[in-house]
Each structure stands twice: as structure tokens, then as C-alpha cells.
Image (spheres, rainbow, N blue to C red):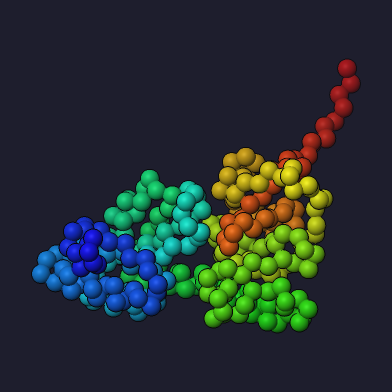
Amino acid sequence: MPDVGELARRSDVIVSICPPHAALAVAEEVAAAVADREPPLYVEANAVSPDTVTAVAELLGPANVVDGAVIGPPGWERGTTVLWLAGARAQVVADLFADSPFDARVLGPRLGAASALKACFAVQSKAIPAAWCARSSPRRSRSCPPPPGGEGAASGRGPHKDQSGGPHRHDSGVSEDTRPVPFPTRRARSPGRVDRAERRLVSLATAPEYADVSTRTLRRYISHGRLTGYRVGPRLIKVDLNELDRLARPIPTAHRPG
């Protein structure tokens, strides 16, 4: 496609994911290109405010806009990333993602609801942990991510270790989907060490099926120190199947005389 305008004229559905500061400019370019025809269904999936979503709806018409919020890592693996949707045609968009790695969920018909949810999640997963780090001692603050506005806080790329040098643990917090930045409020006990070559690491999307428990339960085990969480990249959390095996204990039974 030569430009955004030509793309807009040929499309039935447009999903806008770009740097947030450019979201409104992209919508304006699309609106100008389709001014003489029916606009395409436009999914505003950027990390923008509800006011920006309202402005996009004024350009393209509220009936043609769906408010979207992506929460989770890049959607390569099914079960790790949620696409929250709001708007009159939110279910139409959700149906388009039915067989994709994204778990599309409809919040309701009100535009701005998904963007507001994204903002609340950012406060919970980024701003609050940064505030706790700022309140902690200077010695511990060296292991904390940068405060809001810094590169690590804005992108969720603030990987850090606790003072023992072990893998980071996090609180289960807002939801059972993903936690881009851990909440440093607990210091978990250290489980028995396992040689790195012997670890059988799997993602939190795979481990629940192996252990026959929910993702929420595994996150609670991690936050309470019963299970080690390993960070792989900026957001992906994995656990060791060997540790899951050790959590299983035989139940004592009463001896029956023969």
C-alpha cells in the first residue's frame, strides 16, 4: 500500500496500533481518506485516554469505532494476552479474533471503557510498584525499576532481581492474565536450588494444564514463595516443572489390618 489513505479506502476493518502520540493523527488520516464513503470498522487499540477515543469517534462516527486495549505480552502464544473491547460493534471485532492467539473479551457498548481499563492496569502494574520502590531503603531501591516516566516504567522493561540474586517473584495483583511488572511487596523464601541444565521451564500458559491447577493458583504459589517464577524477556514468566512435581505429596492413609 502506498499510504494510509489508500489502505483505508481498501479496508473493511482497520486495527490501529501505533505510538500512542500518533493515534489521533492516524485516525484523522483515515477519516480524510474515506470522507466520501462509509468508513471502515476502526479498532482504536492504542494505549490512549478515553478522551482520545472520543475524539476518534467524532472523526469516524461512534458506530464505526471500537475501543480496544491490549493487556499482556506480544500475542504469539494463546492464553497469555487479552484484547479488551468496548463499543457498539465490539462483539463483531471479538468474533474476528476467535481463532487467534488473542483472548478477545467484550466490556460493553460504552466507548472509552477499554482505554480506562488499560490506564488502571498501568497504574497497578507500573506506577504503584515504582512508588513502593521509591519508599524503600536506598540499598533495596537499587534493585527497583525506574519510576513512572522512565524508560523501564513506561515500557515494562524494568527487569530486576531481589537481593539474594535469585529469580524475581511477583504478586498476583490485578488479574490472572499477565503481570508485565512485578509488585515488590513480599520477599519469598528460596526453594531448593536446581542446576540450570536440569530445569524444565514452561510458560504460565502451559503449566496449569500440566499441574491441573489454574493460572491464578500458580501465581499465588509464586507470590507466597511456594514456587519460583523465572522471567524470560521483559514480560514472559515461566516455572519449573520439577518444582511443580515436588509440590505433589502423598496423602497418608490409615493402615487397614489384613
Residue placed at 76% from the left, 82% from the top? 138
State the image quarter where residue 45 is shown: bottom left
User: Which residue is depicted at the point 43% across and 49% down?
Assistant: 101
Q: What residue lies at 76% left-to-right and 76% top-to-bottom?
A: 140
In the image, taking residue 148 as reference, residue 167 lies left or right, namely right
Q: Can the viewer see residue 130 in this picture?
A: yes
Image coordinates of residue 200 in percent, x first then y, are 68, 43
**Residue farthest along the top direction in this orientation:** 258
- 93 sits to left or right of 209: left
Task: Indicate whether 144 appears above or below 217.
Answer: below
Q: Is residue 146 above or below residue 250?
A: below
- Residue 78: horizontal and vertical position, in percent? 48, 48
In-front residue for pair 73/224: 73
Q: Please provide percent x and percent y for residue 22.
A: 35, 76
The outermost residue toward the front is 2
Say which quadrant the N terminus sits in.
Answer: bottom left
Horizontal arrangement in the rendering, residue 77 relative to residue 38 (left or right):
right
Indicate the quadrant where residue 185 lies.
bottom right
Between residue 158 and residue 84, name the one nearer to us.
Answer: 158
Q: State how many labels appear.
A: 0
Which quadrant would the C terminus be assigned to in this image?
A: top right
The quadrant where residue 6 appears:
bottom left
Side (left or right) of 90 relative to 148: left
Q: Which residue is the extreme one toward the right?
A: 257
